[in-house]
C-alpha cells in the first residue's frame, strides 16, 4: 500500500518536473537573450529601449482597450447563450459546441478577408439603394468594432468552454427555479445568481481572451489597426533584443493577471464549488 | 371554494401522460403531502403549482385567482428543493433577504424580516456564513427561512429531507411542521417516504401513475386504504387469495380456513367469487380469547428481531403471513415450528380487489 503510494507520488513529481521544464526553459532562454543587449554585460537595456518607444505604449494601450471591449462583448453574448442552452435547449449543445470550435479550423486570414469583403461596402438592402450603414472599414470606430467582433470569434472557443464548464459545476436549473420562486426575473437571475457563481470560469475565459487579443497579428494587420501584435511582429524583424524583452514582459503581465485572479476568486471559487 | 384548487389537471410530455385528470382542493393553513413511488407525477404536480411546468389542461386557482399560466416569479409561492438551492455566492442573511430585495422592500424592513427568519430557524450565529460552511440540515433550514421570508401564499416542499441523514430528517420534519403550524401557512410536501407523510400531514394524497389513488388523513390512509396500491404502498401488508363463502355474513375462505371480514360492500359479492384479501402484520395477535372472530391455527416459521418490533412469520394453511408484535423484555416468543392460534378482528381483513 505504502509502496504504491510512493510510486504514485514519484510519477506525479516526474511529470510535474517534465512539464515545468517544457514551460520554463524557453522562457528562461528568452529572458537570458533579452538581458544580453550589451556585449558581455547583463542588463536591462533592451527593456529600457522598448519602453522608451512611444509606439509601444500606443499599440499596447490600444490592444488592451480592444481586449477589454472583446471581453465585455463576449460576456454579454456568451453567458446568456451558454446559460439558456444548459437550461432550456440542451439539444442545441452539440451544434453550439461545433460552432464555437470553428475558429480552430478556419484560419484568421479567412475570417479577416470575409470581414473586409462584407463590411468594406455600404450595408443595405441589395438592388434597392437603401443603406443602413456606411462601410465599417472606412472609419476608425467602425474598424475597431469590426476587429472587436473578429476577436470575439477568435476567443469564442476559450470563452464558451470556460463559461460552460463553470456552469456545469453549479446546479443552474435549481438555482434558477429557486430565484424565480423568490420573484426574480431573468435579468436578476443572470446578473445576481448565475454570473457571480461562474465568476472564476469567467475570469479564466477573460484571461485567455486577453492573451489572444494582445498578441493577435493577422486581423490587426489586414484591418490596418495599429495594435500590439503587429508592432511586436514589426520590431521582431528589425531588432534583436527588444522583442524578447517585450515577450517576457507580456508573459509576466499574464502571470500577474493570473495571480490576481487566483487571489480575488480563491474564496469565491470555494464558495461556489463546495455545495 | 377552497384556498388552492387543482381542477382536472393533466400534464403530458410528448405522448407520456404524467399527470392524469388530477383534482384536489386544499384549505388555507392545511399541510398536504403528495406520497407515491418515483414517476407517479407528484413532483410534476408540485411544479405545476410552482409554475415551473404548465398543465396541458386543467386550471389551478390560488386564493380565488387563476394562476394556471402565470410565470413562477408572479405567483408568490415559496419553494424548497431537495438540493437546498441556496445561492453559493451569498451569505445566510443575503440568501434570506434575496426575495425581499427583489420586491424592493425598504432595507430596514428587509433587515428586520431577515433577523426574524434567522431567529425562527435558530441560526443566529450563522447569519454571515456561506452555504458551504453549513451542514445539510442547516442549509435546508436556511432554504425554509428564505422561502418563508417572502410571506408566500403557499409553501411547496419537494422532497426537502431526502438528502439528509435519518436523525436530522426526523428532527427537521418536526421543525418544519411546527413552523408551518405556527405561521398557519398552506403547504404541499412531496415525499416517497410513507413515514414522513404519515407523521407530518393533515392530509395525504397517495399518487400512482399520475392519478390520486386516495386522499385522506394519515389515519384513514393507513387504516382504511381504498385500493390495493394504497394498502401496499403505505405500511407493510400481507396479501392472499381467497374465495367468497357467505357474502351476507362476510365469510370467505383462504386455503380452506374461514375468515370473517367487515368490508361494507362484501354483501354485493357472489358466493364463489375469487377475491384478494390483505391484513396488516400488526393486526394479528396470539389468541387469548378463543371465542373471537378469525381465530385460526398457524405454524411459526421464523422470528426476526427488529428492535422495537418483533416480526413473526407464520403460515395459515399454505399461505405465509407476517405478524408484528411490540418488543418488551418479558415477551414470551413461541418456538420455531410450534403450532399456535392467532387472531385478527374482522375489520382487519381488507378485501381490496378481485383475484
Image (cartoon, coloured by chain):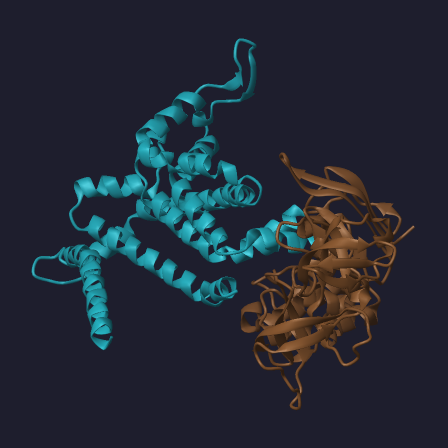
Q: Single out the residue that lies furthest toward the right.
A: B1
Task: Looking at the picture, tell me which residue is in the foreground, A113 or B58.
Answer: B58
Q: Single out the residue that lies furthest toward the left.
A: A40
Percent x, y of residue B138: 62, 73
Which quadrant of the view contains residue B192?
bottom right
Task: Looking at the picture, tell me which residue is in the foreground, B346 or A175.
Answer: B346
Q: Colour of chain B?
A: brown
Position of A242 with respect to B197 (left or right) is left
Q: Residue at x 74, y 75 (%)?
A: B120
Percent x, y of residue B213: 75, 51
Percent x, y of residue B349: 77, 63
Q: Single out the residue that lies furthest toward the top.
A: A127
Position of B218 with respect to A174 (left or right) is right
| Count of numbered marks | 0
Position of B58 with respect to A72 (left or right) is right
Residue B155 can be seen, yes or no: no
Percent x, y of residue A130: 57, 14
Residue B130 can be seen, yes or no: yes
In the rendered view, would you say A38 is above or below A108? below
In the rendered view, would you say A267 is above or below B252? below
Task: Looking at the picture, tell me which residue is in the foreground, A271 or A34.
Answer: A271
Q: Residue at x 31, y 32 (%)?
A: A107
Q: Single out the residue that lies furthest toward the front.
A: B256
Which quadrant of the view contains residue B194?
bottom right
Task: Looking at the picture, tell me which residue is in the foreground, A120 or A207.
Answer: A207
Q: Colour of chain A?
A: cyan
Amino acid at each position: 500500500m505504502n509502496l504504491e503510494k510512493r510510486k504514485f507520488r514519484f510519477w506525479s513529481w516526474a511529470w510535474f518536473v517534465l512539464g515545468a521544464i517544457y514551460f520554463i526553459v524557453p522562457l528562461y532562454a528568452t529572458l537570458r537573450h533579452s538581458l544580453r543587449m550589451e556585449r558581455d554585460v547583463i542588463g536591462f537595456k533592451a527593456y529600457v529601449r522598448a519602453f522608451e518607444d512611444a509606439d509601444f505604449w500606443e499599440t499596447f494601450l490600444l490592444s488592451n482597450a480592444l481586449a477589454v471591449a472583446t471581453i465585455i462583448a463576449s460576456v454579454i453574448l456568451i453567458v446568456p447563450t451558454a446559460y439558456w442552452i444548459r437550461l432550456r435547449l440542451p439539444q442545441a449543445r452539440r451544434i453550439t459546441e461545433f460552432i464555437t470550435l470553428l475558429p480552430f479550423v478556419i484560419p484568421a486570414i479567412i475570417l479577416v478577408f470575409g470581414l473586409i469583403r462584407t463590411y468594406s461596402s455600404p450595408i443595405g438592402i441589395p438592388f434597392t439603394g437603401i443603406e443602413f450603414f456606411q462601410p465599417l472599414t472606412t472609419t476608425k470606430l467602425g474598424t475597431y468594432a469590426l476587429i472587436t467582433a473578429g476577436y470575439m470569434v477568435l476567443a469564442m472557443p476559450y470563452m464558451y468552454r470556460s463559461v460552460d464548464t463553470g456552469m456545469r459545476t453549479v446546479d443552474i436549473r435549481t438555482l434558477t427555479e429557486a430565484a424565480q420562486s423568490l420573484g426574480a426575473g431573468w435579468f436578476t437571475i443572470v446578473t445576481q445568481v448565475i454570473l457571480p457563481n461562474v465568476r472564476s470560469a469567467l475570469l479564466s475565459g477573460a484571461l485567455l481572451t486577453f492573451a489572444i487579443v494582445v498578441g493577435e497579428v493577422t486581423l490587426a494587420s489586414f484591418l490596418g489597426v495599429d495594435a500590439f501584435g503587429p508592432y511586436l511582429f514589426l520590431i521582431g524583424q528589425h531588432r534583436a533584443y527588444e522583442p524578447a524583452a517585450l515577450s517576457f514582459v507580456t508573459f509576466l503581465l499574464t502571470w500577474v493577471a493570473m495571480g490576481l485572479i487566483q487571489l480575488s476568486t480563491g474564496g469565491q471559487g470555494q464558495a461556489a464549488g463546495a455545495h | 371554494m377552497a384556498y388552492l384548487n387543482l381542477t382536472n389537471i393533466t400534464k403530458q410530455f410528448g405522448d407520456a401522460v404524467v399527470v392524469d385528470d388530477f383534482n384536489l382542493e386544499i384549505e388555507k393553513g392545511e399541510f398536504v403531502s403528495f406520497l407515491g413511488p418515483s414517476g407517479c407525477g407528484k413532483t410534476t404536480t408540485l411544479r405545476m403549482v410552482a409554475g415551473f411546468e404548465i398543465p396541458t389542461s386543467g386550471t389551478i386557482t390560488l386564493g380565488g385567482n387563476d394562476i394556471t399560466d402565470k410565470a413562477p416569479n408572479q405567483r408568490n409561492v415559496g419553494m424548497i428543493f431537495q438540493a437546498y438551492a441556496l445561492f453559493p455566492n451569498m451569505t445566510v442573511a443575503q440568501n434570506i433577504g434575496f426575495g425581499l430585495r427583489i420586491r424592493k422592500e425598504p432595507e430596514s424592513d428587509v433587515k428586520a424580516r431577515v433577523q426574524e427568519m434567522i431567529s425562527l430557524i435558530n441560526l443566529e450565529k450563522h447569519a454571515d456564513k456561506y452555504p458551504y460552511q453549513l451542514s445539510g440540515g442547516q442549509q435546508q433550514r436556511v432554504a425554509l427561512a428564505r422561502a418563508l421570508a417572502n410571506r408566500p401564499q403557499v409553501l411547496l416542499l419537494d422532497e426537502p429531507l431526502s438528502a439528509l441523514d435519518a436523525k436530522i430528517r426526523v428532527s427537521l420534519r418536526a421543525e418544519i411542521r411546527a413552523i408551518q403550524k405556527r405561521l398557519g401557512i398552506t403547504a404541499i410536501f412531496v415525499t416517497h417516504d410513507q413515514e414522513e407523510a404519515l407523521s407530518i400531514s393533515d392530509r395525504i394524497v397517495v399518487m400512482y401513475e399520475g392519478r390520486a389513488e386516495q386522499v385522506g388523513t394519515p389515519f384513514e390512509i393507513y387504516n382504511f386504504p381504498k385500493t390495493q396500491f394504497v394498502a401496499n404502498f403505505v405500511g407493510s401488508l400481507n396479501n392472499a387469495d381467497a374465495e367468497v363463502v357467505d357474502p351476507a355474513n362476510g365469510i370467505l375462505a383462504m386455503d380452506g380456513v374461514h375468515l370473517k371480514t367487515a368490508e361494507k360492500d362484501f354483501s354485493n359479492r357472489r358466493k364463489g367469487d375469487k377475491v384478494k384479501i390483505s391484513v396488516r402484520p400488526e393486526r394479528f395477535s396470539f389468541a387469548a380469547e378463543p371465542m373471537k372472530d378469525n381465530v385460526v391455527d398457524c405454524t411459526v416459521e421464523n422470528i426476526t428481531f427488529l428492535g422495537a418490533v418483533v416480526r413473526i412469520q407464520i403460515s395459515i394453511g399454505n399461505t405465509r403471513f407476517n405478524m408484528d408484535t411490540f418488543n418488551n423484555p418479558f415477551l414470551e416468543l413461541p418456538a420455531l415450528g410450534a403450532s399456535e392460534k392467532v387472531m385478527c378482528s374482522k375489520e382487519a381483513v381488507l378485501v381490496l380487489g378481485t383475484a
